[in-house]
Amino acid sequence: MQETVKYTEVTEKVDTFKLMRGKEKLAFMIASFFFVGYLPLAPGTWGSIAGFFLYYFLIPTTGIYFLPVCLLIFALGLLASEILERFTSVHDDNKIVIDEFLGFAISVAFLPKKIVLFLAALVIFRIFDISKPQPIKYIDEKVKGGFGVMLDDIVAGIFTNIIVRLIGIFI
């Protein structure tokens, strides 16, 4: 019988990914958005930038099918975050960026593909995600598990979408 290695027992010099088994590795690849969360300095910003490029250039953000895309990202992010939180005992590890990827999707959902609107959404979403005004801060502090990881960015995305729509009226 193999002994489980706890995340808290591992020194910083050991790559945690190497200690994971299949399910945890898959969860980490999804949660880190295929290792974007490993990029230096500001992983959440990198996750949002990845969303910017994918949603602006590759994935249409209008049309009825975009809602199922967001629901799929939410479900994958929820499950992956839950698995990682159990494995690491860390809530909302900074390497988890699938929540920013979804939050940015919500920020630009059903908006016209105008570069100025997408750039405004990127900046505003990051401001909300970093500063965490209420109720985002409450959600971040009180809602645990994968749902909490995902929900604060969903709310930040909703706020961002509303503000960008208002900006769009004046452009």
Image (cartoon, helix red, strand yellow):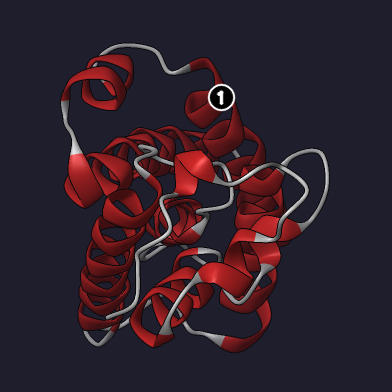
Residue 93 in view in this figure:
no
Give whichever of 116, 18 is nearer the camera: 18
Residue 139 in view in this figure:
yes
| Residue at image point 32% right, 65% down | 77
Q: Position of residue 82 (x, y in %)?
A: 24, 57
Q: Which residue is mark 1?
A: 130
Place residue 135 in its image quadrant: top left
Q: Position of residue 167 (x, y in %)?
A: 53, 35
Q: Position of residue 132 (x, y in %)?
A: 43, 18
Place residue 102 in its image quadrant: bottom left
Q: Is residue 100 left or right of residue 154?
A: right
- Secondary structure state at the residue bearing disc 1: helix
Give whichever of 30, 69 is nearer the camera: 30
Query: Which corner quadrant holds the C terminus?
Result: top right
Residue 66, above or below 134? below
Place residue 106 in its image quadrant: bottom left
Give whichever of 76, 115 is nearer the camera: 76
Q: Is residue 130 left or right of residue 87?
A: right
Query: Which corner quadrant holds the N terminus?
Result: bottom left
Q: Position of residue 58 (x, y in %)?
A: 61, 88
Residue 45, above or below 64? above
List the single residue furthest toward the front. Answer: 1
| Residue at image point 49% right, 26% down | 128
Q: How many discs appear?
A: 1
Residue 84, above or below 139? below
| Residue at image point 70% right, 61% down | 15
List the single residue furthest toward the right. Answer: 40
**Tag 1: amino acid:** Ile
